[in-house]
Amino acid sequence: MSAARTLAPDPRGQIKTRQRVRDLAEVFTHEREVKAMLDLIPDMFPAGSTKTVDAKFLEPACGSGNFLEEILRRKLAGVRFARVHLVSRYEHWLLRALASIYGVDICADNVNESRLRLLEVLRSHYHNDANTMAPSEGFAAAARAIVASNIVHADFLADASRIEVVDYQPGRGGTFLRVWSMLDDSAEVRRMPDLFHPEPAPKRDEVPVHYTMLAANGEPTRASELVNTKGG
């Protein structure tokens, strides 16, 4: 019976079922170990600082998001509304911390859970840090668009050269300039250029996009085609 092969969830959160261990070799890292490992790089998370809020992290087998969640929590620790005093700037900083985190997992359930956990960390930080403020229109949609593009369901070992993610380059006035690329483009870099069949330029926005417009503009934008949903 299948029930005989299924274990109750590990109280330490390291396995879900014996079948998943067998099929996916899935064993999660305990929260205690996650924190201990991240403590080894204290310079990456200076207390009360936003200097590394844009530091990029990639977890090639992210599981249900144990590392991603703790990384985001540490990046957000220095983002405080009391220091910013402006909702749009505050939200832009929060999204910058989120947009520089990437994850890949072979299990779709894990990917969905990772996305939800990151969104919950973001929501919780906003509520606890600026509890008298309400998120602006477009903030939650932008966060969902970011995790949808950068927390990906794929086999990293087999598909790295075909996994497309987005580099959200922060700009002034709450904007991002997005560049689409593959996680592993080393094969393209090594290949000799073909003068007769040049490689297409990476997909990118022609104009910066305000964070409240990210969800409505899922493809690279042109100034004449930008869908404006800011404030409405």
Image: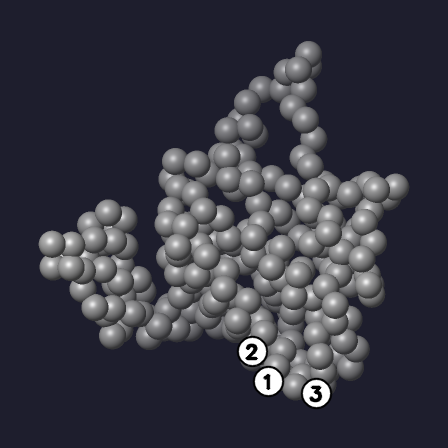
Secondary structure, mark 3, is loop
Q: Quadrant of the C terminus?
A: bottom right
Separation of disc 1 and disc 2 at Cα? 6 Å
Q: Residue furthest bottom?
A: 132
- Count of number-bearing discs: 3
Which residue is situated farthest in the top direction here? 196
For mark 2, give the secondary structure. Answer: helix
Task: Label 1, secondary structure: give it.
Answer: helix
Give the image quarter of residue 141.
bottom right
Q: Is residue 19 left or right of residue 217?
A: left
Disc sitting over residue 128 in the figure: 1
Disc 1 vs disc 2: Cβ atoms closer than 8 Å? yes
Percent across and percent down for residue 33 are 32, 70
Q: In the image, what residue type sits under mark 2?
A: Ser
Q: Residue at x 31, y 65 (%)?
A: 29
Residue holding disc 3: 132
Q: From this view, report whether residue 210 is shown above or below residue 155.
A: below
Which residue appears at 67% of the width and 35% of the height? 202
- The span from disc 3 to disc 1 (Cα, nearest Å) is 9 Å
Identify residue for label 2. Answer: 124
- Say few, some or many: other residues with alpha carbon within 10 Å of mark 2 (under 14 / 14 to 19 / 20 or more): some
